[in-house]
Image (cartoon, rainbow, N blue to C red):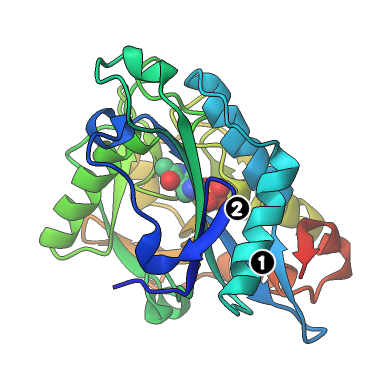
Amino acid sequence: MIKADKIWIDGKLVAFDDAKVHVLTHALHYGVGVFEGIRAYKTADGRSAVFRLKEHVQRLYDSAHIVLMEIPVPPERLEQACVEVLKANKLDAGYLRPLAFFGAGAMGVGAGATNPVQVMVAAWPWGAYLSEEGLKKGIRAKVSSFTRMHVNVNMVRAKVSGQYVNSFLATREAAMAGYEEAILLDTEGYVAEGSGENIFIVKNGVLQTPPLSAPVLAGITRDSVLRIAKDLGVPVKEEKFTRDSMYLADELFMTGTAAEVTPVREVDNRRIGKGEPGPITKRIQDTYFKAVRGEEPRYREWLTPY
Ligand code: PMP
């Protein structure tokens, strides 16, 4: 069970056990909440920093805009709240979870838009999302029987709570079948993304990921990896690919704030490449971890020290 000292809710830091909502909270019933997942890391200078805080907070406000929600505090205040929560919990590294949602009031589906919008930020220590071993050796993934929702169903630029039922079903199905993660195809059958990660393949030295016109989240780790690949001189293609091109890829990995850069060594019981993290994956993963820890001066602008 996650535990911390304090949670920031509606402008105040309160004791962990006091951060409660009413059972008639509209978002609990209909899923209209928007959220972020952000990581903070210890940095090389002995301090700590939040990774790409501004971009995450911007995406939260973009998500709110998409679902017609007005977050009652300005983005700068939310950025500050993220840092306050880390400090209040004496966390020199950890995971931040901001969430804005329609609170209690009217109960009609659309009527909830008039309810007060509540905002919270929690933080806790969180290790490797798909295991330490997965980061080192790669994970086993399975193409899901659940499809990533069509772009006119899933608001792809938004991280909306209710949209995560799709991810929940896919990730449970994969886990119950003995795999570590699910890969979802889009409604046309092309590879979209993981339950909470973007996906990349490497073939003949070229890095490829689905374009942002596909039903995929505009992942901030995806963006960081594209920049890192460019800086490392790895050619990149943002183009759709098929399920069988994953089977034939030389390398495959997934990216996300929680999952970081996780190699995939097997998909649907087919070994990927040599069945271990490949050289391009390793270079990108290594550079990513240097970037988040402030060990690469060219990526310092991504860090908010605290
Ligand atoms: N896709 C989905 C569905 C996600 O939930 C996430 C996690 N936010 C990602 C991709 C990766 O996004 P990011 O790198 O911004 O964490």
Can residue 148 be seen here? no
Marking on residue 221: 2
Rate crowding at label 2 as few (under 14), some (14 to 19) or many (20 or more) other CA atoms within 10 Å.
many
Instruction: Identify the image quadrant of residue 148.
Output: top left
Q: Quadrant of the image for the N terminus?
A: bottom left
Residue 270 at x, y percent in the picture? 26, 59
Instruction: Identify the image quadrant of residue 155.
Output: top left
Marking on residue 278: none
Residue type at the position of mark 2: Thr
**Horizontal side of residue 162 vs 136, given as left or right:** left
Residue 104 or residue 58, whichever sits in front: 104
Gap in angstroms between the C-alphas marked 1 and 2? 9 Å
Q: Quadrant of the image for the C terminus?
A: bottom right
For residue 209, above or below residue 137: above
Residue 159 or residue 231, whichever sits in front: 159
**Horizontal side of residue 241 vs 82, given as left or right:** left
Can residue 269 be seen here? yes
For residue 232, above or below residue 120: below
Instruction: Identify the image quadrant of residue 177.
Output: bottom left
The residue positioned 39% from the left and 81% from the top of the image is 133
Cβ atoms under marks 1 and 2 closer than 8 Å: yes
> In the current view of this chain or complex, which residue is farthest to the bottom?
46
Q: Secondary structure at mark 2?
A: helix
Q: Secondary structure at mark 1?
A: helix
State the residue position of label 1: 288
The residue positioned 44% from the left and 50% from the top of the image is 197
Total labels: the figure holds: 2
Residue 54 at x, y percent in the picture? 72, 47
Q: Does label 1 or label 2 sit earlier along the sequence? A: 2
Residue type at the position of mark 1: Tyr
Residue 165 at x, y percent in the picture? 25, 39
